Image (spheres, rainbow, N blue to C red):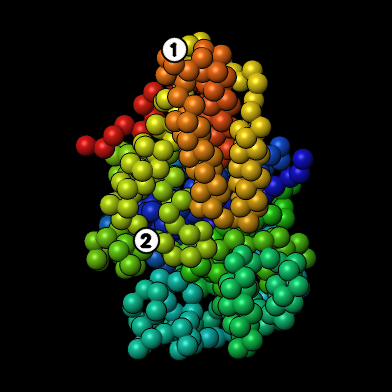
Amino acid sequence: MSRFYLTTSIAYVNGAPHIGHTLEFVQADALVRWRRSAGDTAYFLTGTDEHGAKIARAAEAEGITPATLTDRNSARFRGLKESLDLSWDEFIRTTDKERHWPNVERVWRALEAKGDIYKKTYRGLYCVGHEAFVTEKDLENGMCRDHGAPPEAIEEENYFFRLSKYADEVKRRIESGELAIIPHGRAKEIVNFINQGIEDISFSRPRKDLSWGIPVPGDDTQTIYVWCDALVNYLAPREWWPADVHMIGKDILRFHALYWPAMLLSADVPLPKALFVHGHITSHGQKMSKTLGNVADPMGLVARYGTDPVRYYLLREIPPTDDGDFSEAKFKERYEGDLANGLGNFAARVVALARRVGVMRAEAPEAAVLEAIAAARAAVGEKMGEYRFHEALAALWELIAFGNRYVNEHKPWDKEVPEAEARGAIGNALLILAEVATLLMPFMPGTAEKIAKGDAAMLFPRLE
């Protein structure tokens, strides 16, 4: 048994939760549940990122205070725990002055004591979408590639962090595997970025321009840069540090694979062990955006289809480390084929047969059944260890398919089949179903619990 500490990125609360957030939460939850099922002691941290210019502007646009906006939207993210059946241990908010702010101030002072914080006047291009200064190489036709908006030209006096001092050491840690980045292509991406040359970065904004944030310790005319503030959330449960896995989206790789390790090196704090970087969800091949009106509402999907079908789709259909497409047509296809006709049909048949003849368990497990179970168990474990959630589920569905074939071949409902043989077949089918429930638990916990309790009559009602 070992300890396992996993974090998601903390969600920025300038808007409501979208399906991209849902993907990350569900991937993280499946991974931590799997580790717990293997006997590990695990801690799962998530939360909300609540400072910065985007928050202040979003609140102003609504005619409300930033505190009102963040309280409302943070509550929406916290509500995902119940709607998506998530098992996090702590939900942290960066506006929490007791839990979060003292850690940020301690890290700032540690960087300052190392001589890695200094003040200078800076002129640059600031992207509000990224909450970061950008360079011309980050732009396309004068626009931010990610946000499609021009950055703002800003000249101001800020505190800076000596990122350049630590870039080579961060690169060495990545290349040596001390800081693992999954998939490997993302590691190469950040190493190539470092090789282009790294400059020091702004770590504060004038408080007159941005009052919504944590004041710089000892200088209340400046507000700590939102990324410096937000990244420190991972240190909240200090007794669990270092994190075994930071689960993040590809758009925030630079902050987690360069800025954060550099901050930790400066503060003499151990680095996380791994970054798992997932892709984005597209809609019919297009990036989801409110402008195009193709943003999928995760809560609407849960309301229509249920929690576990949403979890299943995201884990099975979306490649863990690449972009994946969402469409309701594909969702329905998975629901009908894999869930209703596959798992649901198998579970309902086996439970009904067992109740009819009074079989409770397998008295004489068959070798072929035990082999199929062992193969599924090994495959799921191997794929989960590689963060390949979709392939782990594919291996589990092979066991379900084996179970359906087994029942069809043995025909335990047929009166011409000897009673002892029929009872034996039903017992073996129950053994397969029990293993399916065990392996299913990290992915679809509610469904797994129903199967384990023998409540499998209508797991996935047919769609109208």
- Kindly identify the residue that appears in the image at 42 percent across and 19 percent down: 414
Q: Nearer the viewer, residue 429 or 15?
A: 429
Q: Residues within 10 Å of mark 2 (few under 14, many from 20)?
A: some
The quadrant holding residue 275 is bottom right
Q: Quadrant of the N terminus?
A: top right
Q: Nearer the viewer, residue 301 or 96?
A: 301
Q: Residue furthest front?
A: 416
Query: Element at badge 2?
Result: strand
In the rendered image, which quarter contains the C terminus? top left
Q: Quadrant of residue 75?
A: top left
Q: Is residue 173 above or below residue 69?
A: below
The structure residue drawn at horizontal position 36% and vertical position 47%, both measured from the top left corner, is 334
Question: Mark 1 belongs to which amino acid?
Answer: Arg
**Residue 117 in view (yes/no):** yes
Q: Position of residue 200 (x, y in %)?
A: 62, 82
Residue 101 position by quadrant: bottom right
Q: Is residue 354 left or right of residue 182?
A: left
Residue placed under numbered mark 2 in the picture: 325
User: Is residue 316 toward the left or the right of residue 224 in the image?
Assistant: left
Residue count near mark 1 (Cα–Cα under 10 Å), binned few <14, some 14–19, many ≥20 = few
**Residue 356: which numbered mark, if any?**
1
Local SS, label 1: helix
- Answer with mark 1 or mark 2, whichever residue precedes in sequence: 2
Asked whether residue 446 appears in the rendered view, the answer is: no
